[in-house]
């Protein structure tokens, strides 16, 4: 028995290593490509840090938030090409996403062992993931990995850790807001409490201290995200296949449609909360994955001024969703196609495309299928009561990652 278990564990390690090396080889092939985003933004920012080191934080022209700028400043002291350093960082987070995903699947039971290897491979070879890090030199894998880790901590009844990780994700990227409504679902499911929210701003505050000491004003620290929201607000969509890619065919005006999209997104999130209240107190992980995917997908599909990369969280969570809800496997290729269409518009066409309506409709189908899973695959409960914040958690024990 011991020999069989040892061999099985050794085989798992060998297969995991083989998958990891194959995924790395794919990424290394793309290392020399420098995207327009890198040449226009990242390279000039790195030149600033190469000249001034950490002191360049005082006058940097970057509109990225502080944790990522700290890393860029650190890279300026390393005698390796900037393009490689930026891609290596994002690729490391690719692997953190994949290993976290493997841990989530394994926690479902020993029978999922081989499924976890399949999901590990699927994650590393998911086009939107390796294109984002190894080809585009973007950093979406950082905040997405932290969101996934926050999700994993929550389902293992580690709510404070979960909230801190979400706060750290928000400190890296504003797009974490697409994930934050999931915490209301977790609260309704009694996996966190309202007072845990006090931990959310801690990472942001701590990471702001160095630049505040260097002379940044509090308004400048806060203004990083407010400025980002204003830069691209003139467009209803920036290659995101969503509602406005469909409406754009009819050449609609910015107003009132800009506000209609925001209102629609808020109504959609409230609808998901309502479904969660009606269905049950304690959800299985497959149900939580469905609500998480629906929120990450639906918010981006409805909001205006969305970019081509903003379905990244949906790309991550759809892998977890189909692993736990295999009967709805078809949603994965729908999300993949829709997301890649936005990538194609930027990376291949190099322009804002007006031909994303079909991808938007396919993503709508994926959204409808996911919401249907939230409704049909979540067992109803006997009575409707909001969670008592003073009640004890009542979840079964989970295996650690």
Image (tube, grey):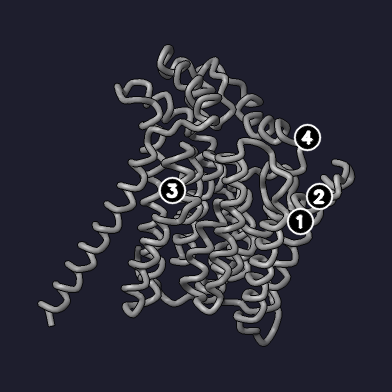
Q: Do the numbered discs 3 and 2 sit on residues whose CB atoms are within 8 Å? A: no
Please identify, in this view, whether the residue under mark 3 or under mark 2 is nearer the observer: 2
Find residue 56 and report its horizontal and vertical position in percent. 48, 16
Give me the residue at 54% from left, 23% from top: 212
Question: How far is disc 3 from disc 2 in space, using C-alphas?
Answer: 31 Å
Please identify, in this view, whether the residue under mark 2 or under mark 4 is nearer the observer: 2
Residue identifier under label 3: 130
Give me the residue at 55% from left, 58% from top: 336
Residue identifier under label 1: 266
SS at mark 4 in the image:
loop
Q: Earlier in the sequence, mark 4 or mark 3?
A: 3
For label 1, count other residues whose C-alpha is less than 10 Å away and answer few (under 14), some (14-19) or many (20+).
Answer: some
How many dots with numbers?
4
Find residue 33 and report its horizontal and vertical position in percent. 43, 33
Q: Earlier in the sequence, mark 2 or mark 4?
A: 4
Q: Earlier in the sequence, mark 2 or mark 1?
A: 2
Question: How far is disc 1 from disc 3 in space, using C-alphas?
Answer: 31 Å
SS at mark 3 in the image:
helix
* Left or right: 198 in relation to 360: left
Please identify, in this view, whether the residue under mark 1 or under mark 3 is nearer the observer: 3
Residue identifier under label 4: 234
Q: Earlier in the sequence, mark 1 or mark 4?
A: 4
Q: Is residue 277 above or below residue 66?
A: below
Residue identifier under label 2: 249
Q: Earlier in the sequence, mark 1 or mark 3?
A: 3
């Amino acid at each position: 028995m011991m020999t069989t278990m040892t061999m099985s564990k050794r085989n798992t390690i060998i297969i995991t290593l083989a998958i990891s090396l194959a995924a790395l080889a794919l990424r290394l092939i793309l290392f020399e490509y420098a995207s327009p985003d890198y040449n226009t933004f990242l390279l000039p920012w790195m030149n600033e840090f190469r000249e001034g080191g950490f002191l360049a934080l005082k006058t940097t022209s970057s509109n990225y938030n502080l944790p990522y700028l700290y890393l860029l400043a650190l890279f300026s002291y390393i005698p390796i090409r900037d393009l490689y350093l930026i891609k290596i960082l994002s690729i490391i987070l690719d692997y953190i996403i994949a290993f976290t995903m493997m841990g989530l699947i394994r926690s479902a039971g020993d029978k999922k062992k081989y499924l976890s290897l399949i999901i590990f491979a699927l994650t590393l070879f998911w086009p939107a993931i390796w294109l984002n890090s190894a080809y585009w030199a973007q950093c979406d894998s950082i905040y997405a990995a932290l969101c996934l880790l926050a999700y994993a901590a929550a389902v293992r009844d580690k709510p404070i850790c979960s909230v801190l990780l979400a706060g750290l994700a928000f400190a890296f990227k504003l797009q974490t807001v697409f994930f934050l409504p999931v915490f209301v679902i977790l609260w309704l499911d009694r996996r966190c409490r309202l007072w845990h929210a006090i931990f959310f701003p801690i990472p942001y505050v701590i990471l702001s201290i160095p630049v505040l000491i260097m002379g940044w004003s509090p308004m400048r620290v806060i203004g990083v995200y407010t400025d980002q929201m204003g830069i691209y607000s003139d467009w209803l969509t920036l290659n995101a296949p969503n509602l406005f890619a469909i409406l754009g065919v009819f050449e609609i005006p910015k107003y009132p449609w800009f506000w209609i999209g925001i209102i629609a997104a808020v109504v959609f999130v409230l609808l998901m909360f309502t479904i969660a209240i009606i269905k049950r107190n304690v959800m299985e992980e497959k149900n939580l994955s469905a609500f998480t995917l629906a929120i990450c997908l639906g918010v981006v599909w409805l909001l205006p001024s969305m970019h081509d990369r903003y379905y990244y969280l949906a790309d991550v969570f759809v892998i977890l969703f189909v692993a736990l809800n295999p009967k709805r496997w078809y949603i994965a290729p729908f999300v993949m196609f829709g997301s890649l269409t936005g990538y194609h518009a930027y990376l291949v066409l190099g322009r804002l495309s007006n031909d994303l309506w079909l991808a938007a409709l396919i993503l709508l189908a994926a959204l409808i299928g996911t919401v249907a899973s939230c409704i049909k695959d979540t067992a109803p409960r006997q009575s409707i009561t909001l969670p008592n914040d003073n009640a004890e958690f009542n979840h079964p024990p989970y295996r650690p990652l």
